[in-house]
Amino acid sequence: MALDFNPENLDAASFGSRAQGICNNYPDAFPDKNLSANQIRRKLKSMGIKRPAGQLLKDLGVVTAPKSTRTAVFVALRKLACALYFKETGRILTPAHRIAGMWQQIQDAQRAPIANYLNDLLPEYRNIKRSNMRNYGKRFCYKFGYMSEDDFFIFTSQIGEGLMLSGMAIPPEMTLPSPMVMPIWRVDDPWDSSGEDLSLLLPQVSS
């Protein structure tokens, strides 16, 4: 995203300028690149990535996202769930509806089966285009499915070539399985909520 989804920005000066802008305006959200060798190994293993032969660990572009970045991504995920639900159903989620979801990088091999499953499962596809923006390809697209009889909405989306946000909007009366493998929030939860409240697996009532 630092390249504004434009491959022509893939040069040191343009990338450095955008990265510096993030650092200046959101210093607590800038990825931590000062990882130990063990941290890099664990990160590569968790993503199913093998280190290229002869490549030094310190030369690999491995970073970790701070808490503020994860919070920002989850806020974006929750807002996106509300927006897509409204766009595709014409209805507004109630405060007692719940949103569950996850984010991943396209390069994350460990979570690739989830992305592939959702891509194969969901029937409807949208590729959003705006006439006042240069066409760089798939800046934002998504697939979704809606079970109207159960009021259950699920989607997966791709932003540019790097970030995927997937989630679902769950009706208040539905009971969810335990353990839940992804964070979950009520629509009316505070934005900084961690998404770890187990009581949200039970049917909800409006506040």
Image: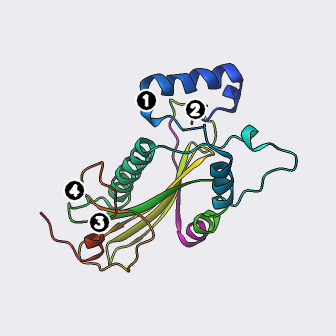
Which residue type carries mark 3?
Answer: Asp
Specify whether 119 is left or right of 28.
Answer: right
The vertical placement of 62 against 188, above or below, is above
Specify whether 66 is left or right of 153.
Answer: right
The quadrant of the picture occupied by the C terminus is bottom left
Question: Which is more N-terminal, label 4 or label 1?
Answer: 1
Q: Position of residue 128 (x, y in %)?
A: 51, 46
Residues at marks 1 and 3, CA–CA distance in whole angstroms: 28 Å
Number of marks in the image?
4
Residue occupied by mark 3: 197
Q: Quadrant of residue 197?
A: bottom left
Q: Is residue 171 visible?
A: no
Residue occupied by mark 4: 188
Residue occupied by mark 1: 26
Residues at marks 4 and 2, CA–CA distance in whole angstroms: 31 Å
Residue occupied by mark 2: 2
Which residue type carries mark 2?
Answer: Ala
* Magenta region: 117-130
Residue at x 45% of width, y 70% of height: 181
Q: Does the stretch in magenta take in 190?
A: no
Residue at x 64% of width, y 32% of height: 6
Residue at x 55% of width, y 68% of height: 118
Residues at marks 1 and 4, CA–CA distance in whole angstroms: 26 Å
User: Element under label 2?
Assistant: loop
